[in-house]
Amino acid sequence: MKKKSADNAILNPKDQVSETFIPFSFFWVFTWFALAFFMVTPICGQSKSHPIFDGDTLFHNLSQRWELDSENYRGNFRFTPYKPTYILLGRWTSDVNKMPTSLNPEYSVETPIALNSTELKFQISFKTKIVRGLFFNNLDIWAAYTQKSHWQVYNADLSRPFRETNYEPELILNYGMNIPFLGFDIRMAGLALTHQSNGRSLPLSRSWNRIVFHLGMEREYWQIYLKPWIRLNDTDDENPKITDYYGRMEAIVSHQFGKNLITMEATHSLRTGANNRGSIRLGWSFPIDGYLRGRLEVFEGYGETLIDYNHRQFTIGLGVSIVEWR
């Protein structure tokens, strides 16, 4: 039998030693705006040396993002953008998950956690090509990493803890192509071995492994990614039936108009009836200054994080981004 760990200390904030904090959120908002500035400054400073920031191009096609054509090749082991990188300075939820549960009873919280409905959320994501032209000229291997964190930075009563952080390393096999299809050009297809976990222990631990297939297509101002997956079996299932909640497939659609980008990320269980579940995330990226963009995000459904895999909620957040889907 596994023992419940020190993670449970978060469940009883009254037992913790009280501390004195700088009043509410002005300090923290200023701190994160400063962090966003220092994140953007070195990246924008690479504009002459890093091809992905060449010229005045804010958005990139699939060939530029994934180096599908020889003129877009930038070299192995060089970090490039993967998923969006952003900070939501305020993210509000309609239903705080104060008692995370799992269909595995060992992974269910028994005492409510004193969480706020408003928190800070940020994500970083990057990839690097590690093998070019495996067996075929257009077959490449990439390594990628994404980290998404939800920080109760405005929750002084609970000592401002990180509520949830999801770590997601990937090994990606990607094949470049150019096949016309229904007015789009299919530019890439492949698969990835993906691990995602939150690095916690009982009863808050969540993790799963997948083989994720992908297909990328585009035309002019549109890009579409289709990502169905197969979940790999775990010896100890921390989140049973996660695919009936989080889903078995994801579709990512982006549309550029001017310097704005509208995105939709939707997951679905590919089931009907009681298991007809999933999520949808709508995003609007708008220009602020240079490569710094504002980001408005709305989410509804299951699985915004691993700890919330079977928890349905509506969330809305506002912040800044330096990398988007294209």
Image (cartoon, helix red, strand yellow):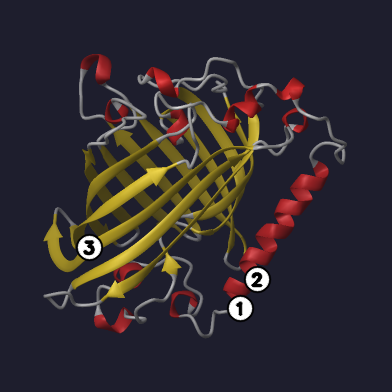
Q: Say which mark, if any, is on residue 41.
A: 2
The answer to whether 279 is drawn above or below residue 11 in the figure is below
Question: Residues under labels 3 and 2: Cα distance?
Answer: 32 Å
The N terminus, quarter of image: top left
Residue 205 falls left or right of residue 156? left
First in sequence, mark 1 or 3: give its number. 1
- Could you tell me the amino acid type at mark 2? Thr
In this rendering, which labeled residue sits more in front, label 3 or label 2?
Answer: 3
Q: Residue 168: image x %, image y %?
A: 40, 50
- Return the residue nearer the eye: 205 or 132: 205
| Residue 229 visible in the displayed image | yes
Q: Which residue is mark 3?
A: 173
Question: Element under label 3?
Answer: strand
Q: Residue 65: image x %, image y %?
A: 36, 68
Q: Are marks 1 and 2 in contact (CB under 8 Å)?
A: yes
Rendered residue at 42%/42% (across/down): 197
The answer to whether 37 is drawn above or below residue 237 in the figure is below
Question: Residues under labels 1 and 3: Cα distance?
Answer: 31 Å
- Could you tell me the amino acid type at mark 1? Gly
Question: Residues under labels 1 and 2: Cα distance?
Answer: 6 Å
Q: Residue 276: image x %, image y %?
A: 26, 21
Rendered residue at 31%/50% (across/down): 194
The C terminus, quarter of image: bottom left
Q: Which residue is mark 1?
A: 45
- Could you tell me the amino acid type at mark 3? Leu
Residue 217 falls left or right of residue 97? left
